[in-house]
Image: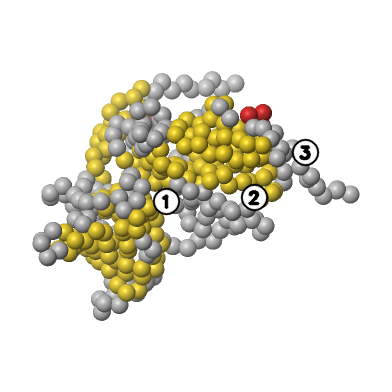
Amino acid sequence: MRTPRTRHLQTALRGAVTMATSLSAIGLALILPLAPASHAQELRVHPTPFSVMLDFHPEPGQRTGLPLWMEAVQQIPELAPDGSPQKTRFRLRLLRMPDLNPEVQLRLFFDDVAEGALVVTGWTETGQEVYRSKPIGAGLRLPSSETLFIPVAGTDYLDIETPGDGSSVRGAFVSTLRRFEGRHALDFDPESVFSDPFQNRAGRTPSENDSFLFGRVRATIDAAMAPLTPQAPQAVFEFDLEKPPKLAVLHFEVLQLSPLSPPILAVNQNKLPNPGMQLPDLADPGYQGSPHFQYSGWIHCQAPVLGSALRPGRNQILVELPKGAASLVIRSLEMDLKYSDAPLRYPRIP
């Protein structure tokens, strides 16, 4: 028998790597395990030649490289008669390369201060508008992000337009998109037709009607947004059940979630475990803040519920902000209910 080789790992500072992933350079101090020379580890920077993280408010003198299909980034203020900023355009000048980037992903990072405050448009040099987004912003007064997929084959520049001096728009992640072949079960729609570079799950769209599948009932409890603030830290949702299930799972999405301080959940005054969170890759630019990071985007959460915690008739769900936590918003509250005695029919094997 071969004796297994034991590796005694120690941690030590291996060095600092500086990457220009935005208009401001970011220094990364990495702690790596020391290993025998024959098994030495190397730090390999993930190349991103066709993507860029743009900082619209860089420190003086700080710049970043642009992908070869992007010519320049400009900030264009539009002044009111009194000289104050009326609106601001962040202009992304593109080079036409239809074989390389017929479509781009534009993910905006902004402070959601007013409903419908932002709009993105695409233009030709002759002044023809070839793209216009829906108004962006729900007036939640929290940091947020929004992803757009923009055809740019005949586009010379994109304008990101916002009221005022533009300080509410922090930056944008821009990347070339390409199509790929995927597969999904014929009886079911694919969860998403977009593969997010940071494994960020697509938002759920609650249905107006309940749905049944293989003994599971999926029901929308509340599709609206519910802000939780230190001044109003609780939200209560009520729903009726004809019959309690054997097991249930509560689903919802959270904006500006702190991964270490998830919302507190209770069903009929029975406290639930901390919800599970489907966190994106830590490289995602949506993580903001220090030392306690929050995510400027929507994160899917779920929590199991014992069937014994539910009852026939009226039921109540309490969602509460943890003590000392900052404001957040929840939306798309759904519940999956599993009934083991549901009429399932399996094909008979001859």
Disc 3 from disc 1: Cα separation: 41 Å
What amino acid type should be assigned to the residue bearing mark 1? Pro
Residue 87: quadrant of the picture: bottom left
Residue 278 higher or lower than 57, as above or below: above
The residue sitting at 60% across, 21% down in the picture is 1
What amino acid type should be assigned to the residue bearing mark 2? Asp
Disc 1 from disc 2: Cα separation: 32 Å
Q: Alpha-carbon neighbours of circle 1 within 10 Å: few (<14), some, or many (≥20)?
A: few
Which residue position is annotated with label 1?
197
Is residue 218 something that shows in the picture? yes
Is residue 53 something that shows in the picture? no
* Image coordinates for residue 306, horizontal then vertical, percent: 64, 30
Which residue position is annotated with label 3?
341
Q: Earlier in the sequence, mark 3 or mark 1?
A: 1
The residue sitting at 48% across, 56% down in the picture is 194
Which residue position is annotated with label 2?
210
Farthest residue toward the left? Answer: 82
